[in-house]
Amino acid sequence: MTQHLPVTRATFDEVMVPNYAPAAFVPVRGAGSRLWDTEGREYIDFAGGIAVNALGHCHPAMVAALTEQAGKLWHLSNGFANEPAMELAKKLINNTFAEKVFFANSGAEANEAAFKLARKYAKDHYGPEKVEIVSTFNSFHGRTLFTVSVGGQEKYTKGYEPLPPAIKHVPYNDLEAMRAAISDKTCAVVIEPVQGEGGITPATAEYVKGLRELCDAHGALLIFDEVQSGMGRTGELYAYMGYGIAPDILSTAKALGGGFPIGAMLTTDKVAKSFTVGTHGSTYGGNPLACAVASAVFDIISSPEVLEGVKAKHARFKAGLEAIGRDFGVFKEVRGKGLLIGCELTADWKDKAKDFMTAAVAEGVLILQAGPNVVRLAPSLLIPDADIDAGLEAFRRGVAKLVRKAA
């Protein structure tokens, strides 16, 4: 029998590398959109594990899929195929632009594969000079050295120099800036269709259409990082579907596994051919446990009922958040798509998003921030309306106390 050692929040500071600063309480159990901590206190979860827990906590279909697969097969090497990986790949291909899939363990690894493939493809088809990647400021693509370099936020690269070369950054949603940056040396343009860590900013339809045309004109691949925006989060299975164009490569993770670590890179037959045997790999990528769970998650999220429900829940959240913003003068704008929602703070509350997180927790609701100036919500796609209403009321109480304290 496994021995469980006594632990508290203080244990974290004793044993963990200090790159995180977790909350003062320790969650120990979850069900749906509710969490309970070691003291038995209950919370409504609007954070969703940072857009990961798309079906909430401990969804029965996920538990059943994991339990069933755990009794069959846990791991093979990539020298063997496995049924859950091939089944999940077929579902992704049948429901997207993709013709080939590469499995990884996280969004960062899916993006690492995407960026490597883009350079390899360009060299295979155009020669050694076509290596530049153009990204946008305030983007986020993961925490590997390559992915933080492509991401346009200095706070994530500071101290890790020298960084990989041949990466440019331009302002987001600025087509003219992209037009000036892209050239025949560009192998890929990468964007998030909704910037996540950068402040929950959706791309405009004109911008996305223009990027597709620019990439086609310059022989560059268009990469969509849909790690946060994908898997039903915006009310589309993938956000690109709402723009009427398709990327050449798409990365997906977070909600793909509903809480079980998995990532994937989706692409076309033509592009995939540049990853020949031995050119890239992952020990755990395509793990049977992860793929079995993700397959169950996919079946639920891809249903029209869930996707339409996300759009309806967006309207409910937005109305409630805008009312809080009006009543207390705290939000400049409530924006986003589906259940990826950002509340930009007014000038009086600039850079105080963490204060709103703290105030919310005190009232029993979990929220996030997207940078210091945006409150972020990314709850379960299945969150009941009753939990939305109760959570918004709790958040309102927290905001009221925060405003009174500041007065």
Image (cartoon, rainbow, N blue to C red):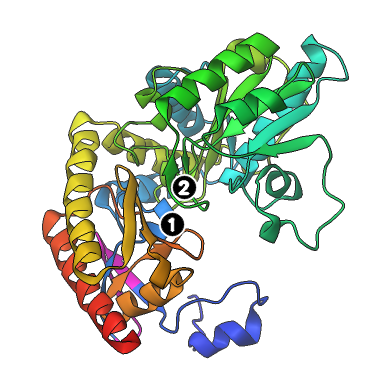
Q: Nearer the viewer, residue 363 or 94?
A: 363
Q: Residues within 10 Å of mark 2 (few under 14, many from 20)?
A: many
Residue matched to label 2: 254
Q: Amino acid at mark 1?
A: Ile
- Residue that label 1 marks: 50
| Residue 33, quarter of picture | bottom left
Residue 206 screen position, x and y as percent: 44, 23
Left-right relation of 129 to 345: right
Tag 1 near tag 2, CB within 8 Å = yes
- Residue at the location (63% across, 87% down)? 14
176 and 30: which one is in front? 176
Which stretch did the figure color magenta? 29-39
Looking at the rendered structure, the secondary structure element under dot 2 is helix
Please identify the quarter of the rendering in which residue 276 is found: top right
Residue at 52% across / 51% down in the picture? 198
- Mark 1 → mark 2, Cα distance in angstroms: 8 Å
Q: Is residue 153 left or right of residue 157?
A: left
